[in-house]
Amino acid sequence: MRFVPFTVSAVITITLIVCLDRSWGSLPPLGRLLSPQEGFWQNATSISKDYNEDLKVPGLKGKVEVWLDDRMVPHIFAENTTDAYYVEGYMHARDRLWQMELQSFAAAGRLSEILGSKMITYDRQQRRLGMLYGAEQALKAMEDDPVAGAAINAYSDGVNAYISTLTRATLPLEYKLLNYKPEKWTPLNSALLLKMMAADLAGGANDLVYTNARQLFSKEDFAKMYPDFGDSIDPIIPRGTQYPAPSVKVTVPADSILKAAGVILHFKEDKPDPDNGSNNWAVAGSKTRSGAPILANDPHLGLSLPSLWYEAQIHTPEMNVYGATLPGAPGVIIGFNDHIAWGVTNGAEDVKDFYLMQFRNGKQQYLFNGAYRNADLHIEKINVKGEKPYYDTVAYTVWGPVVYDNVFPDTATGHQFLAMRWKALDPSNEIRTFLELNKAHNYNDYLAALKYYTCPAQNFAFAAKTGEIALWHNGQFPLRFKDQGKWIMPGSDSTFAWQGYVPQEENPHILNPARGFVSSANQHPTDSTYPYRYVADFDLFRGKRINEVLAADSQITVQQMMDLQNDFLNPFARAALPMIRAHLPVSLLTSDQRTYWELLDKWNLQSSPESKAATIFNIFWDKLQSAIWDDDIVREKTPLQQPWEKTTLLWLIRDSSMKFIDNIHTPEKETLSQTILTAFAFAADSAKVLDGEHKLEFGRFRGTNIRHLTRSIIPFSAMNLRTGGGRHIVNATKQIHGPSWKMVVELSAKTVAYGIYPGGQSGNPGSPFYDNAVQDWVQGKYYLLHVFDPKEDTDPAVKFKVRFSKG
């Protein structure tokens, strides 16, 4: 009688074991995930955990000590530089392995392997952009370089030393949730991450939308909608600077007009956030209270958890450097050492051009200079989690990969084939620049480091304890004739190729200017007298505000520089409000609407979290932009780009009857006053609703969401943060984008530095150091950056020590 129940019990037990040990749809094996021995419980980390360790690892040449401070920042003390990079790789992997691997998978177009078929389109796009191809080209250049090659290989060895210690219990939580394991790290992974940064900062191009606009608008209208230089500029290199005659001349083809006339392109290109940029500046000692130079930098990028950056100090006989490192790559990217400090902002130049190709036999052959050539066909195998692999064929031409064709992004594009020439796919060795800056002593060392840098274009601000300040707008910039690169060019004609690059020594630069400071905020690098052509969308108002503040003071302090990074003043609104006041018929507003107009009219221009007027202004301007441009720009199956806000504002200020105010879909002729009245009435009515819901304060209306890298795991995110700032504002915080690292360095006899980023050192959501800095970042606080000397091992700020020796 006891046999049957025992059998049933055994069957149920076995069934549960089998069920809990396998995946069900998108769910990981629940038995493993919930296991107290190896599941997610193992990823919970106590605030009182002891991090002191003695580790034996293979491959070290000497001994290395890592001191961990109260924020878990590692301070790496190594007897040689190679060992330092090895341990940097180990520490990055210990704290950020899943992030590092996920981002390298994203760059290579491999997300379908871990996230399933929903990522196939994304992976196809990455393959067609040539991301893996570009990383392979960069890797060849790095490995041929003795400094960069040694660094990336030592770094990879360190990452793999950590990976080899992992068990099922100690795997980062996301591996358990997504049910996969990390691969061995290679230098190619590091190259992929660097290419991902290039895509973020130099992946934009307007060729497609400008080509369409050029078919729909006159040459005169196009020039006003998308001007090379606006009515008002405050360039990085001050206006009026005299430039020497160019040493290289550009040949203009006899037929340089748009050959693709009449062609409307239906491809919609995914572009990086147009506000990917930054602020940086360096102030000479003659303008500071201490008499020492001060350098500040805050790169504006997409915000995520884990955070993009990871703080570290690296001390070897060659260098003592501190700053923001990039998990996945050796060295410090933005920082300072015992002699200098440096910071970077996006140069913004377009270094990507598209060419309309003529193919025959499918993708087999393309026309070039009167004859057909064989395309280099790359068969891309995209492995898909839980499904059969997906195969795509990418044709490579003399220009580069064919990004868009008759099967991508869809099959309804009229068989248009667009090949891409992109500087980021060329062999390059940018990491060498940062490795050299890490140990630079002076301006000449800084110059030598910049010569390795090609893409993406960056403004490198510099300051030294010897007193020099400088800024170079640096990268390799294509030599183009006028308007080349603005629209699609004929791919069958070699005369439309780039004609080389601007000589590096002729890139815009400035050293020790009389005004006592250098600065950049993604604005024009020069005025129109610079002898070479460049194509880009440039900011305006942040740079003007920074220069205004720096020029006004001669007793600048570190605290003032932190205040400037957190500045909420909206200079765009400051320029717009007089125009709004002049054209808004206030008498036609309802009493409720007039209440909100009074809020805006009396606004102190601070886009702070508690400001209601900031919300009203943002709603109003978005509505005004749409009212002016949507009837002209929004066209079915024809991607176009709305002119920038600064272009609209400056145009309205100089011409209140500009033709695009009139809505082409209505019989009456709209005026600026009518359009402003309609837009403000909408903003005021919206504000009343928001006010009733207690959501009119800017920090509640917009705020900031710092999402987990998966974009879907809300508990691992920091949501609904009450922030101020925004586009055109020095504090450029937006809803999912903003200052990803803020640093201020005073190069006094003993360097004093402060910094913060919105996250924490650990990538483990179960760690107290995962998002511990987020609220301080929201409130505009900074942390003192501890730069330890090897003799300071008893400093109370040193909380733990990890000792590495050869195993």
Image (tube, helix red, strand yellow):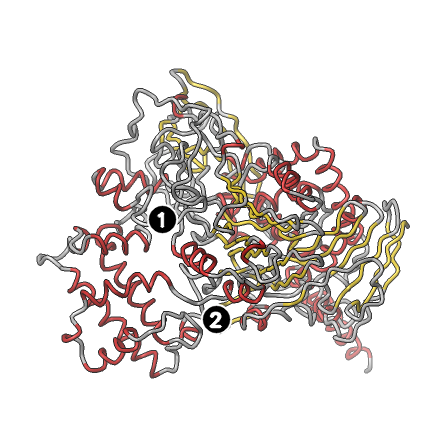
Classify residue 494 by image quadrant. Answer: top left
Q: In the rendered structure, are the residues bearing label 2 and label 1 in contact, judged by CB atoms less than 8 Å apart?
A: no
- What whole-number distance in Å separates the C-alpha atoms at marks 2 and 1? 28 Å
Residue type beneath disc 2? Thr
Residue type beneath disc 1? Ile
Rendering coords of residue 324 (x, y %)? 64, 55
606 or 715: nearer the viewer: 606
- Looking at the image, residue 512 sits to the left or right of residue 409; the answer is right
Q: Residue furthest left?
A: 668
Residue drawn at x 87%, y 57% is: 55
- Looking at the image, residue 371 sits to the left or right of residue 451; the answer is left
Q: Residue furthest right?
A: 807
* Relative to 411, residue 610 above or below: below
Answer whether residue 180 is visible to the viewer in this image.
Answer: no
Which quadrant does the N terminus fall into?
Answer: bottom right
Report the residue marked by disc 2: 723
> Is tag 2's residue or tag 1's residue first in the polypeptide sequence?
1
User: Judging from the image, what secondary structure is the residue with disc 1 in?
Assistant: loop
Report the residue marked by disc 1: 233
User: Judging from the image, what secondary structure is the residue with disc 2 in?
Assistant: loop
Rendering coords of residue 34 (x, y %)? 71, 71
Classify residue 571 by image quadrant. Answer: bottom left
Rendering coords of residue 595 (x, y %)? 25, 81
Residue drawn at x 48%, y 74% is: 722
Rendering coords of residue 222 (x, y %)? 25, 42
Q: Residues within 10 Å of mark 1 (few under 14, many from 20)?
A: many
Answer whether residue 581 is visible to the viewer in this image.
Answer: yes
